[in-house]
Amino acid sequence: MTSTEGGAQGAAAFIAKARAREPEMAFAEVFCPRGLRERFALWGALVFEWREAAYELSDARPTEAKCAWWADEALRCAQSAPRHPLTIALAAPGLPWGTLARALVVASQAEAARPIDRDAALATAEPLASAIATVEGALFGASAGEDAKRAVAVHLVGERLQLGDGGLVPLSLLARHGNTGAELGQPGGEPVLRDWARELAEALPSDPSGACLYRRARAAFDGWRLRERARGARPLVPPFRAVLLAWRAARKARWPG
């Protein structure tokens, strides 16, 4: 096996890992021009890895270590010397990788204290969300405006709900329901989690102006999943619904050129 073949297989494994959590994105990829489909899939897998590193690990030590690794990888990408299968396959040295590297370091050092309210929770994700939106805009020739950044922030924070835990649920909601953070994983914490999903859905831009297909589709799927979670359901996006949401997103998506 050549190194190129090995790299391609490695990238495919990471794409499969991301799609196991976000299978609906495969439906959005269908609406990409053929020449952008590989880029679409690689980018989704990278965003998944960064989100996992910053928000989904067990405690502060592995979070700091993995974010530091990815920050170093971003700097290597800026120097045209990537080593990860995803960044090697993406091969886009001209992107604003330095911004992303700094944001990953900030994310790894974020305070572990529970945020006061929804705006504070989203503010913790803002540096990484802004960096992701900036790189994404450059990669797909789209906007990195406030709507796109907000959509990324809601995605980063909201995905914690898909893990079934109460991470980043703000103190304001706990106080309103008379709960503690330790109760969120128990049946009595379910109303808090439903209200949290509702608040995040309300914060999500309904039509991220100037954004690329990846962000528009991801925001549409996030909105659907959050609204369903607010009703007490935890479903995957049904295939027909995913196709419809992706088609609507593609109609207004910004493309390179």
Image (cartoon, rainbow, N blue to C red):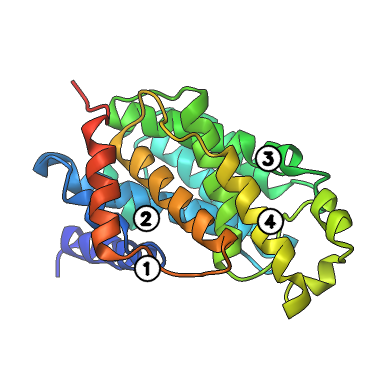
Q: Foreground: 86 or 167? A: 167
Q: Which residue is mark 4?
A: 195
Q: Residue type at mark 2?
A: Ala
Identify the residue at image location x=47%, y=56%: 49
Query: Sequence-wise, which precedes: disc 1 or disc 4?
Result: 1
Query: Sequence-wise, which precedes: disc 2 or disc 4?
Result: 2
Q: Residue type at mark 3?
A: Val
From the image, state whether disc 3 or disc 4 is nearer to you: 4
Secondary structure beneath label 3: helix
Q: Which residue is mark 3?
A: 106
Report, in whole angstroms, how far the alpha carbon at label 3 lies from the one at label 4: 28 Å
Report, in whole angstroms, how far the alpha carbon at label 1 lies from the one at label 4: 29 Å
Left or right of 26 on screen, residue 126: right
Q: Which residue is mark 1?
A: 17
Local packing at callout 4 (Cα closer than 10 Å; few below 14, some 14-19, many 20+) is many
Q: Position of residue 90 (x, y in %)?
A: 28, 44
Identify the residue at image location x=18%, y=41%: 36
Q: Is residue 211 placed above or below 250 in the rendered structure? A: above
Q: Quadrant of residue 103?
A: top right
Report, in whole angstroms, how far the alpha carbon at label 2 lies from the one at label 3: 21 Å
Q: Outermost residue toward the bottom?
A: 187
Identify the residue at image location x=39%, y=45%: 220
Query: Sequence-wise, which precedes: disc 2 or disc 3?
Result: 2
Q: Quadrant of residue 161?
A: bottom right
Q: Which residue is mark 2?
A: 45
Q: Outermost residue toward the left?
A: 34
